[in-house]
Image (cartoon, rainbow, N blue to C red):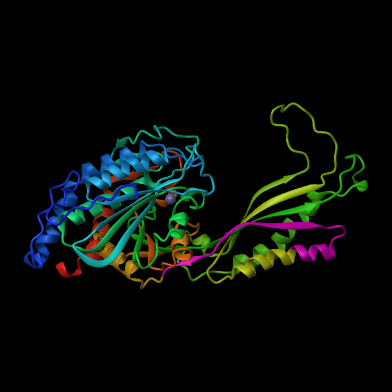
């Protein structure tokens, strides 16, 4: 526990940048506040928070939390610690000691902040990752400048997902100001390493019990899935390395050796003729977007065979050898309808068939990682609540979607055993990881309202 700030009743500090909360009153004081009063107060708070939302998003973008290698995780946790402590949250900084990548130079820091309400009740947790991916080429703006131009804030991580993190903080602060007597608790976490699997972030926290259903009942992950969509989950992933073997010989007499690259060619050919057509015919009932990802897919991530290229001396000529090893990494994304054993078995059986049909074919298959699909029921309380708030704010039904790639929901589901979890946040999905990434301030404001109304529905239902 880094800090435990407990504010006695009647001494709730003013929400950062917003009007101070009214003092606690004895005996069901919320009964005195009418629905319109509370809700009108909430909408006023949100309307007045636009500048604070922009400033917070800019501040977060200006802390370059690049992953890899995992830079400035402590700095961003420190910033969030100060911000959320000022808003009355108890905060804890948690280092994922021993997680992949955790070291003295790049420690994997996370923050969990909690603000208990006036009465017992359920806990709503907003989880955002604080890491951002490599900047890459093609930028016309400062990737860590947080520049505001024509209603858009630019920077690496603007939409994925510092804008979502900022929106959830502002939503919580506005809700607390307007509904100070809410029940249950609000938690906000900023976690490391989502972009590299989340093992030093949500997975670590889930193992420590932070997503235990006894502690947390609803989780919203403000990933940039667009402000009008509720994302229920994601497809699964299976990553493996396949190696074929040959025998080295002089390149002028390849018949004296055995070419591992040709063996791999046979593997890829078998994928083309037998696996890809079967996968393309499978279509999931998961509402995955974009449409192409409703089918099973497999990417061949890399191929390496024969001599390593000598990058340090690009004018050097290769010596003449038959390659004795060839490796590929496959990235197989699978559907909730496909059992993992079937996914593995299909690839294994292609390789085993080749050992019987192709002379001297030998292979090795090494699994690198797997993630099972995760899918929250669209009738789950958090999904229904956020969808209702979207319809209220945007005047049209929410779209239920699933993500082609995985995100931290997998750890909350599998390790935390918490099923009532969705992704909902502002930002255009297709801008994630791109040059000149941006987030629209109006979109963030709409999402703030959706998140705040969701908090009203879940934590102050008797005050509406
Ligand atoms: Zn993300």
Horizontal side, residue 352 vs residue 48: left or right:
right
Q: Position of residue 433 (x, y in %)?
A: 46, 44
- Residue sitting farthest toward the left: 32
Q: How many marks?
A: 0
Q: Position of residue 24 (x, y in %)?
A: 10, 58
- Residue 155 vs 301, above or below: the answer is above
- The quadrant where residue 10 appears: bottom left
Q: Position of residue 39 (x, y in %)?
A: 14, 60
Q: Pick whichever, 25 or 288, lies toward us.
A: 25
Q: Indicate yes or no whether the magenta region holds residue 405.
A: no
Name the residue rendered at 21%, 41% in the picture: 51
Horizontal side, residue 354 vs residue 388: left or right:
right
Q: Quadrant of the C terminus?
A: bottom left
Q: Let me know if residue 464 appears in the view.
A: no
Name the residue rendered at 77%, 39% in the picture: 307
- Residue 418 vs 127, above or below: the answer is below
Q: Let me know if residue 170 appears in the view.
A: yes
- The quadrant where residue 389 appears: bottom left
Q: Position of residue 221 (x, y in %)?
A: 37, 57
Name the residue rendered at 36%, 33% in the picture: 145
Name the residue rendered at 38%, 71% in the picture: 378
Horizontal side, residue 181 vs residue 286: left or right:
left
Q: Pick whichever, 411 or 351, lies toward us.
A: 411
Q: Indicate yes or no whether the magenta region holds residue 358.
A: yes
Q: Which residues are magenta?
A: 351-376
């Amino acid at each position: 526990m880094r800090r435990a700030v407990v504010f006695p009743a009647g001494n709730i500090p003013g929400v950062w940048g917003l009007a101070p909360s009214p003092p606690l009153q004895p005996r069901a004081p919320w009964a005195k506040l009418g629905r319109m009063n509370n809700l009108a107060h909430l909408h006023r708070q949100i309307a007045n928070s636009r500048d604070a939302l922009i400033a917070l998003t800019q501040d977060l973008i200006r802390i370059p939390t690049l992953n890899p290698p995992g830079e400035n995780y402590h700095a961003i946790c420190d910033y969030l610690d100060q911000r959320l402590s000022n808003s009355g949250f108890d905060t804890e900084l948690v280092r994922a000691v021993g997680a992949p990548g955790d070291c003295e130079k790049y420690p994997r820091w996370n923050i969990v902040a909690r603000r208990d309400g006036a009465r017992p009740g359920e806990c709503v947790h907003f989880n955002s990752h604080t890491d951002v991916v490599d900047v890459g080429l093609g930028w016309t703006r400062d990737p860590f400048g947080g520049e505001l131009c024509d209603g858009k804030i630019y920077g690496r991580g603007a939409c994925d997902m510092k804008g979502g993190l900022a929106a959830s903080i502002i939503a919580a602060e506005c809700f607390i100001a307007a509904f100070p007597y809410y029940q249950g608790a609000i938690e906000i976490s900023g976690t490391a390493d989502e972009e590299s699997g989340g093992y030093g972030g949500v997975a670590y926290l889930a193992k420590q019990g932070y997503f235990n259903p006894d502690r947390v009942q609803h989780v919203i992950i403000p990933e940039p899935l667009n402000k009008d969509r509720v994302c229920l989950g994601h497809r699964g992933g299976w990553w493996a390395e396949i190696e074929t073997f040959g025998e080295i010989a002089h390149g002028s007499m390849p018949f004296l050796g055995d070419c591992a690259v040709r063996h791999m060619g046979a593997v890829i050919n078998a994928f083309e003729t037998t696996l890809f057509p079967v996968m393309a015919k499978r279509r999931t009932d998961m509402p995955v977007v974009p449409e192409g990802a409703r089918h099973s897919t497999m990417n061949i991530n890399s191929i390496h065979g024969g001599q390593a290229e000598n990058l340090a001396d690009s004018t050097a000529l290769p010596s003449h050898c038959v390659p004795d090893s060839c490796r590929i990494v496959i990235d197989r994304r699978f559907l909730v309808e496909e059992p993992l054993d079937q996914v593995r078995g299909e690839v294994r059986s292609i390789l085993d068939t080749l050992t019987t049909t192709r002379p001297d074919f030998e292979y090795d298959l090494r699994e690198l990682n797997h993630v099972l699909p995760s899918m929250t029921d669209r009738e789950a309380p958090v999904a229904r609540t956020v969808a209702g708030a979207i319809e209220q704010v945007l005047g049209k039904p929410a779209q239920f979607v699933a993500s082609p790639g995985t995100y931290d929901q997998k750890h909350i589901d599998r390790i935390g055993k918490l099923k009532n979890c969705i992704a909902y946040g502002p930002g255009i999905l297709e801008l994630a990881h791109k040059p000149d990434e941006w987030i629209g301030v109006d979109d963030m404001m709409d999402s703030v309202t959706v998140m705040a109304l969701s908090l009203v529905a879940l934590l102050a239902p008797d005050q509406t």
